[in-house]
Amino acid sequence: MAQNSGTTSSPASTGGSLSNPSQSTTASTSALAAADAKVARLLAKLKKDGPEVLKKPTNLALDGAAFRFFLAISACLCLSLIFDDQRIGGFACVACFMVLLSDTKSNLWGRLFGCFIVLVVVSAAVLAGYLVKDLAYGKWLVIAVACFGVSLLPFVENFWWLVGKYFLIFLMISLYDFAPDAAALEGYGLGFLVAVGVIIIDTLMWKITRLGVRPMDQIKRFIGGVRNPRSFAVISAIILLFALWTALAVGFQEPAWVGITVIYLMNTKISVGVKKSLEKVAGTAIGYAIVVFIFAFPVSYHLYILGPLIVLMGTPIPVFIAKNYLLSQVCVTAYILLVLEWLTKSYGGDASLLGWRLLDTCWGAACALVGFLIMALIDYIQRKRDERRYRKAEKEAEELKVLNQRLAEQERIRDEHLKATTNPAHP
């Protein structure tokens, strides 16, 4: 009460509120409106419910999206049989998967334009990487560009965030001792064509059946945007640089794989919560464990076993993106590793490559986990600060409400007094 009385006396001492209650009431009302707006703004900042709430797709829409992935991936693998070249099917699976995973637009022309942009960006990244890496300090230049790019990705919106991530990943792939051959170019081109064909068919079917919300729209819940804090951009770049530097210093067989792991894991929308970020790390680890278990059986290396496994892991991805983020990351990781194993086998590699990928993936995931924990600590500190500001603003708003009520009461008494003096009652 002492605090409230002290607050209510300040207007009288500064502006003669008792002599002119109308002006004081107006000023107090304006101050109260400003205080309420401040409270609402701080409360909205405290409510970190993640990005916009999207409508859930129907079961029929989920089934249609899963069938689209099944059809596209199966068609890409069949290219290996048609051209009698295992490499073409593998590269086609990579290209087709990138396009389908970045297919977040609604209209046909927007979706086809997205396919074209992904093709151009990936091609530019591969070309730039292989032209620069053999220059003096070329590999360090690639790493510097990757670190700078990963610091910008947290602020890029929706589709362009996915394209930026593909650019950085393929820029890091250029650090491998591998040069694109005719089979790679042919496979990528055919993979994009398969994706375009599936998207056209999917658009026509969606218009005919009117299925409503598309499952891949749900991926917008997790991809970057302006809601990411600036500190996340700095931490992402530092974590990537640290992971690559330690991998090079220790002598990892393929440090680029460490960088790719960090880029993939760190690029998320922090506003969805640290839990989702940890699910991404856990999903990657579980997916890798599943692949290691699969290849513990020698029969898994047979193409007629490996191919169905690739389709099996790729088909449910759009369903899990809409329903279970952890399982979607498990399937994405397993799919990528199985396709890479398909390509490794086509170039004469063996299962020993899975071992260094495991080590590199674990180190990249550990670095990303440290980054997420740092972000969790920063988020906790900022949230506590915002809570203190909110409580303070709420207290000030309550005091202004009391002041406003007292001023309104004074004005009412004054009006009654004026009426009584100007219109005295007759006996």
Image (cartoon, rainbow, N blue to C red):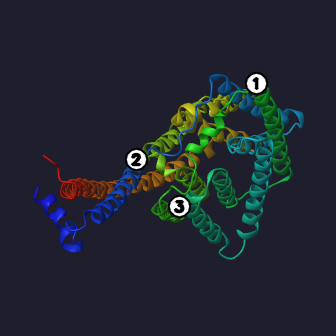
Instruction: Please state the horizontal and vertical placement of residue 81, each as a whole percent of the image.
Output: 85, 32
Characterize the local packing of mark 3: few (<14), some (14-19) or many (20 or more) Cα atoms within 10 angstroms: many
Amino acid type at circle 2 is: Lys
Q: Is residue 229 above or below residue 49?
A: below
**Residue for badge 2:** 47
Q: CA distance from mark 2 to mark 1?
A: 38 Å
Is label 1 or label 3 in front? Answer: 1
Amino acid type at circle 1 is: Thr
Which residue occupies the foreground of this view, 85 or 421? 421
How many tags in the picture?
3
Q: Mark 1: which secondary structure?
A: helix
Residue farthest to the front? Answer: 427
Report whether 24 appears left or right of 367.
left
Report whether 237 appears left or right of 114.
left
Q: CA distance from mark 2 to mark 3?
A: 30 Å
Which residue occupies the foreground of this view, 415 or 22? 415
Is label 2 or label 3 in front? Answer: 2
Instruction: Please state the horizontal and vertical placement of residue 249, each as a whole percent of the image.
Output: 51, 65
**Residue for badge 1:** 209
**Residue for badge 3:** 240
For the N terminus, the quadrant is bottom left
Q: Earlier in the sequence, mark 2 or mark 1?
A: 2
Q: Mark 2: which secondary structure?
A: loop
